[in-house]
Image (tube, helix red, strand yellow):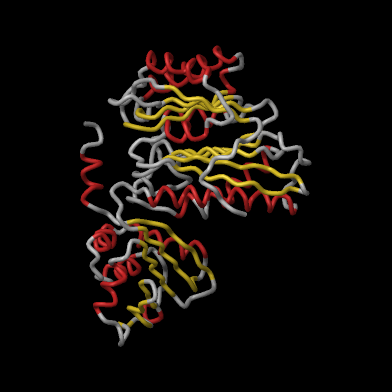
Amino acid sequence: MTISAEPGPVKGIRLGTASAGLYNKQRDDVLIIELTLQSSTALVLTRNAFQAAPVTIARRNSAHPARFLVINAGNANAGTGQQGLNNTEHICEYVAKQTGCESQQILPFSTGVIGQQLPLDLIRTAIPVAIDHLSPDGWLAAAQAIMTTDTRVKIASCNFQIAGQTCQITGIAKGSGMIHPDMATMLAFVATDASVPQAVLQNCLDEVVGDTFNVISVDGDTSTNDACVLMATGQAGNTEIEAGSAEYQQLKDAVFGVCASLAEQIVRDGEGATKFIRIQVESALSTEEAKVIGKTIAGSQLVKTAFFASDPNWGRILAAIGRSPVENLDVARVSIWLNEVNILQDGNPYPNYREEDGQRVMSCSEITIRVALQRGKAQATILSCDLSYDYVKINADYRT
């Protein structure tokens, strides 16, 4: 299976964009996604207690067959209280009126500045334009419309076989900062034309998210608006996929490939990032233990700033491992590598380690931290990046 950055159209999906003027510069910031009547949808949403109004409404409306998604960038509609919920419901009703469906069939999503009410007049003006622009080839424009601090679009696409029938899957995502998800990424929308019942589709998304969007970290912050939507239109002509079947595994592999690509693209576009860091934790007691240690390393500001400075201060990695919430960790069995350079062996500094070797690795744009715990057979990989001056500048100036 080859993942492409060229978006392949998905039968049964149309996308349209427009500008509501939510940014200082002219750009599209409203997206409408249309699904056919036969479609099923699966959602994974943020676990942040301050959930944005659209997250609350999307969760409620997900009990009904979805016909349209409405997404805006530039305003998160989070921390906006009852008025924010009212505004979201109004947008759903407006889209429903424009398209001839029920408001419960609309799934809303937002991203941008927290704590500001949606400018309803502006968004209402943009929605009919976006509907007029609906097209099966609207994926690139859609990926651009949902961007906030992103510097590049994030698209992944492939086709796969189900019982000899070719199916298409394409996804877009946005996210660059406030990335340390406890469910997914900032926003991700993935669609396939395969025929998949809702319960099977939801199970597939739940299984894939844990090892794709949930193993990335840019800055240790989760969002109030995180959402990942997987849509299946049933237009490919395949027999409906059953849970546990060989066809289900083929579907899951395709969804995993697209989501893993999108997740990696988010980290590579981390706000102000100059280095891509892969943290491999092996020989752990459990996969969850490996992920906990990997995420602790990824979330350490001292580790991240050392990588930005190309400083082989590996004691920061050791300290992060040591403070991970892991019981009975035997540090005398821990070994650490930076790329191929062994820096710690069985809890002791590697005798042949040289500072210049560590410096050479830390000067690379892509670095792998490998940690061997010698506790079991489980492993996990976490994706992260460094923390630069530009990260501070981007977020200090976010609202100006």
Q: Quadrant of the C terminus?
A: top left
Identify which residue is drawn at 31% across, 68% down. 317
Q: Quadrant of the N terminus?
A: bottom right
Q: Quadrant of residue 318?
A: bottom left
Identify which residue is drawn at 58% across, 26% down. 34
Q: Is residue 253 left or right of residue 380?
A: right
Q: Quadrant of residue 360?
A: bottom left
Q: Quadrant of residue 233?
A: top right
Where does the image place residue 176, in percent across and percent down from the top left? 36, 44
55 or 232: nearer the viewer? 232
When the figure is inspected, residue 253 is found, relative to residue 105, above or below; the finding is: below
Q: How many marks?
A: 0
14 or 216: nearer the viewer? 14
Where does the image place residue 61, in percent across and percent down from the top left? 56, 27
Identify which residue is drawn at 39% across, 35% down. 147
When the figure is inspected, residue 375 is found, relative to residue 155, above or below; the finding is: below
Where does the image place residue 17, in percent across and percent down from the top left? 47, 25
When the figure is inspected, residue 361 is found, relative to residue 19, above or below; the finding is: below
Where does the image place residue 173, in percent across and percent down from the top left? 47, 40
